[in-house]
Amino acid sequence: MGLVISVAIVLPALGRAGFDPSVFLALGDEKPIQTEYARQLLGDVITRPNFGHDGKFFFAQANDPWYLEPEHHASVLDRPIYRGQRMLYPMIAGGFGLLPPAAVAWSMLLTNLIALALGAWLGARLAARWRLSTWLGLAVPLNIGLIFELDIGGAGVVAYVFCMGAVYALAIQRDWLAALLLAAAALTREVMVAFALGLFVLYWLDERRLRWRLLITPLIAMAVWQAYLQLRLAGISGVGGAPRIFSVPFLGMWEAIESWTGDPRRLIMVLVILGIVARFIPLALRGRSPIAWGALPFVALTVVLSVEVWREPFDLSRALAPVLTAAAFIFLVPKRDSVSARTEPPHRKQA
């Protein structure tokens, strides 16, 4: 069902584009460098208004995931070192450097579709272990933040599914596997180290034992890859022009209010997202659900997000995607049962 939903989401856009996968590369009319790069490799491509989004950068990375020819590929990135740290999604989509550009365009889309389906399966397995409905697995492909990631060819889907895999590995008491999956998530999208931090804190509170491998393994993996990037991308400055992601606490939210009030649809979407977050926080803190505690740090991160992120519900939902799936797991716990009893990690029940 996860795969069916995912395919149903992309088919209309793909059909309107004449089944041209470049529609999911998110190439922008006002970003001629990346668009011309794609045209040189693919021929005619479909562009979007304004600047497009992340997919145009991941396409360049997937064509040279090892940065063996950075002067040809990494040079079209806005910030090569920053983009380069998100390596695992383009590495997988690029067939570890073996696929030609035309295949990469399809592979980027297929990688995200398969990841959403796998996320649904992992969610169902977790729900079964916690004695919840396995239909909760569909909270992954129906997550609006992950749907937006799919639409722009982003790495968020793959990154979050690695986190889901880590939670399941912990549920079956495979700590080292969980640590490696968290490292994979961080190498896919660096902010996912926050998910590892949430799990680290949960298990310290729950067991009074520090599971350092959950946090140290992603940090070591990121440091090693960063050292490789510094070596391979020396002298590659990129094209600049990247938007801000972080700002002074609460400033981004404050500056975005004017844009919300001028667009009722945008305002409604933001209020719905914030309402979910407000309800999520106390339930997550009272419970012991790993999927919820992994998502909690992302709530804290919203405080320092820039106005560029806060202004668009599209980007805000992507930043809070782990919260939106975790919310389904804790909101739908039957009221007759306590949150902690229904969502506590399996190791508590076995103790």
Image: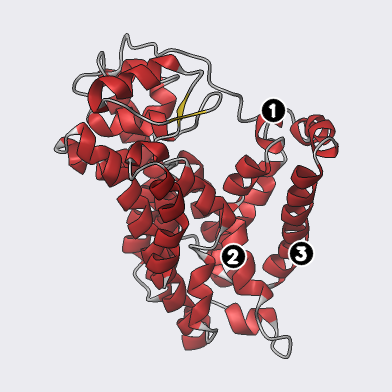
> As rendered, which of 280 and 152 lies closer to the eye?
152
* Label placed on residue 247: 1
Q: In the structure shown, which secondary structural element does the residue marked by tag 3 occupy?
A: helix
Q: Name the residue under label 2.
A: 326
Tag shown at residue 279: 3
Tag 2: Cα neighbours inside 10 Å, few (<14), some, or many (≥20)?
many
- The kind of residue on which mark 2 rests is Ala
Q: Mark 2 vs mark 1: which is more N-terminal?
A: 1
Percent position (x, y) of residue 156? Answer: 46, 47
Q: Distance between the residues labelled 2 and 3?
A: 12 Å
For badge 1, the amino acid type reads Ser
- Earlier in the chain: of badge 2 and badge 3, it is 3
Identify the element where label 1 is drawn.
Answer: loop
Q: Residue at x 62, y 43 (%)?
A: 314
Left or right of 89, for residue 51: right
Question: Which quadrant would residue 308 be assigned to in this image?
Answer: top right
Residue toward you, 185 or 344: 185
Note whether 299 is above or below 256 in the view shown.
below
Can you see residue 166? no
